[in-house]
Amino acid sequence: MGTRLSSSAYMCEELSWWSSDGEDLLGMVARDTIDNDFFWMILARDRVGRFRCASLMTDFRTQDYAERQLWVAMAKVLENGSVEEFGQQGDETNSPLDPFDVAADLKDEELHPYYKQLKDEPGRLPARKVISELALWLAPKDPHFVREFQTNGFDQRLWELFLWAAFREFFLDVEQLDAPDFRCCGPGIDFTVEATTAAPSQNGVLQEHPNPKSPEDRERFLRDYMPMKFGSALTGKLNKVNASGQRYWEREESKGKPFVIAIADFHKSADNNELGSMTYTQSALWQYLYGARVTWRFEGDQLIIDTQSIDSHQYKGKVVPSGFFDLPEAENVSAIIFSNAGTISKFDRMGAAAGFGADGYGYFRVGLKYNPEANAEMGEAFSFDVQGDEYEEYWTQEIQVFHNPNAKHPLPFEALLGATHHYFDDGHLKSVTPDDAVLSSFTMLMKYVGEGEAVVTKKSSS
């Protein structure tokens, strides 16, 4: 994923992909959209371990001829036994790394419990494969990445891996910065992103995370507790300054362009047998962002949606104002990105769908997707065998973008084409939603056993 430049979508049409046994070499044949001729490319791992272009040949008259010449070129590299040297680029500053290689000085009790689950459980093989490949692109520029991923920064680092993959799938060139975290560029597109999480509180009235059971408890949870949790993380980023007193949008990489905060909720249910609240907390986010709440009702057969203003959120005596986009300095935040899918389950599914499922395990997904019916009050249910021939999934299917109506530098919708976009217009919240958008889901990881053995199934939010 890290190999393609954003401009390649306009310059060429990828036609076929090939690999050697063991996938030491990858080959691609494409059509040059400008000259309308064909070329081949061989990719090999560089010194860091990333697949990058190692050889390129252009100006072939037909796709068939280009493919035959590609096979010859790949065979020569394999016959010479020079695959490792062939992939070296000369600009690498690091050696290959493994995010699942734990340093000798790191004690087992220091490892994050979800990292240990990811590292040790056989059924998590597809997630390990995907994360190992993605980390090759992020970790070399960040010396603290692997250690934080293994310890107390697990959620934040997993969220950054997910965001990087999603931005690359949006066909953006992604540059890692000290702060903000990312700069995303493409033809006519340039914006920066700071990633954060609504992590469990360590003190204060929000320290005890509710576990709503009834519809009434869930309504109160989404009306007050979660907006305050999102608000704490977002206002922290809004008010943060560096040693020079600069806010994120005042730093050189962000000046005069859209600045975006990407937030995820990593709360888990107190009951391990229940889905985490992260599957449905997006409704609390937009209430806090816009200072408005939506209710719905039917008049005959027609669904009527009403929008009501919210002044504040209250929980256990604490009160915070609603409407993040109306706060002082918030006009410098162009949009908020949210997804409930930056989870181990997402990486498992992406790996399993790509053919890296663990032997003896099944991966099944159940959830709600966008329902295009005009009077639909809820999403359309779906269920899939992730390893089935017809299953497709993308990093960007759960991405939601909340646009700031007061933004100094609005984020163009086409910057994240294919995401769900929310915006306020004439006092009403409106959305642009792609047909394949997923609202929420959970994943069942099933271990197949022999006759007389216990069936093991794990269920996790995504």
Image (spheres, rainbow, N blue to C red):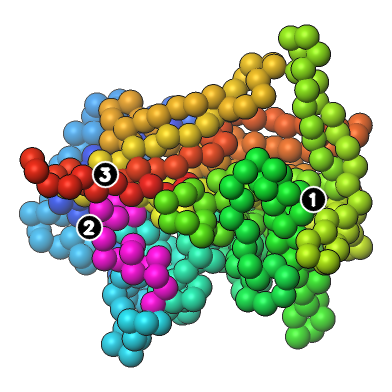
Q: Relative to the observer, which residue lies in front, 324 or 189?
A: 324
The residue under label 1 is 289
**Residue 146, placed above or below residue 356:** below
**Residue 95, placed above or below residue 197:** below
Crowd band around label 3 with a 10 angstrom C-alpha radius: few (<14), some (14–19), many (20+): some
**Residue 125, placed above or below residue 12:** below
Which amino acid type is marked by label 1? Leu
Which amino acid type is marked by label 2? Pro
What label sits on residue 446 in the rendered view?
3
Secondary structure found at label 1: helix
Asked if marks 1 and 2 touch (Cβ < 8 Å), the reply is no
What label sits on residue 122 in the rendered view?
2
- Identify the residue shown where x is 42% and y is 34%: 366
Q: Is residue 113 magenta?
A: yes
Magenta region: 111-127
Mark closest to the chain's N terminus, 3 or 1? 1
